[in-house]
Amino acid sequence: MIPANKALIRTGLEALYFTGSHLALEPLLGGIGAILTLHHVRPAPPDPFQANRLLEVTPAFLEKLIVGLRKLEIDMISLDEMRRRLTERSFARKFVCFTFDDGYRDNLHYAYPVLKQHGVPFAIYVPTSFPDRLGELWWLALQAVVADNDRICLAMDQDRHFDCRTTREKYDAFEAIYWWLRGLPTEQALRQAMHELCRRYRVDMTAFCADLCMTWDELAELARDPLVTIGAHTVNHVMLRKVTDGEARSEMKMSAMVIEAALGFRPRHLAYPVGDASSAGPREFQVAREIGFETAVTTRPGLLFPEHRNYMTALPRITVNGEFQRLRYLRVLLSGAATALHNGFRRVNAA
Ligand SMILES: [Zn+2]
């Protein structure tokens, strides 16, 4: 969900694709594998205003992706196997890991049958407040506020008014408010602003959990399948870098304890919510290691390189984005050229 960067990423990808320069760069930048980030998998919704569209792909695209990867002879492996290959320097074959963030029910209904049919292992990172039905999916609440209203007032630096009658205006309003929220210095300030907005426009922020996220029973059903890894994703889906030391540590630690209590095993893998550089940094990478997570993933874009064995709690991922549901985009991403540009040609970016 990075609307402001979307056009830039797309332009970059198109340029790389059409010039073919990613092919020239491939031997240099190809890496040993990649961890893919997905969120929702479901049929495309009919409403033209889909501010969070980039967080979803269709089941048909997921299947095309799996078939395409298999044709390229890229292994599709679990996070445990990824960790083993990195630590044992087993790089003979390129690999991809499928990871799904947030534990949406559509993962069970639409993604799981496809992954199961093709025997593809995958991980689901669960913020424990979502199956506990206390989670605040504020980005969806914001979308609902904008979708349901023609005009929105919000106390930003000063009182601001947004017209949102047309689909175009709705996208503009969403983008302005979303990035203002993301720019607030603390997670608490973001939540307060969203509570105020939801109260004013009568949106029940916690209702999204019950509608969209798996219950503990559904997660337990998935967890019984050896193809499935359940990972931690904090308790409250907070941008960890925007909370205190104590809160960051307890968000990570408590989420592992709650999953263990609910499902009977302690998760070995973690994903930092939101996961960009403003949400997870060196403090989080160290705390995750201290708590005992074997791997932890960001959403910093990048392929895996042998050096990442020393940065197991600061791993990059490649987002499989609903806006780019074309295999040629993904081929460019997997070539490493686009992410190498983003990382200034550094192979590890863990600052
Ligand atoms: Zn998430």
Image (cartoon, rainbow, N blue to C red):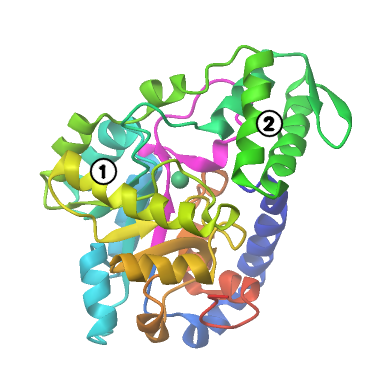
State whether residue 106 is above or below residue 334: above
Q: What residue do we see at 31% from left, 32% from top?
A: 131
Quadrant into which the N terminus falls: top right
State whether residue 288 is above or below residue 5: below
In the image, 309 versus 53, the foreground residue is 309
| Kind of residue sitting beneath label 2 | Ala
Cα gap from disc 2 to disc 1, whole angstroms: 28 Å
Q: Residue 42 at what x, y percent from top left?
A: 39, 32
Q: What residue do we see at 51% from left, 82% from top?
A: 29
Mark 2 vs mark 1: which is more N-terminal?
Answer: 2
Q: Tag 1: Cα neighbours inside 10 Å, few (<14), some, or many (≥20)? A: many
The magenta span reads 35-59
Ligand 1 shown in quarter: top left
Q: Left of 168 or right of it: where is 99?
A: left
In the image, 14 versus 80, the foreground residue is 80
**Is there a contact, CB below 8 Å, between mark 2 and mark 1?**
no
Q: Residue 43 at what x, y percent from top left?
A: 42, 29
Check residue 46 for magenta coloring: yes
Disc 2: which residue: 193
Disc 1: which residue: 258
Label 1 beta carbon less than 8 Å to ligand 1: no
Query: Quick check: can you spot residue 316?
Result: no
Quadrant into which the C terminus falls: bottom right
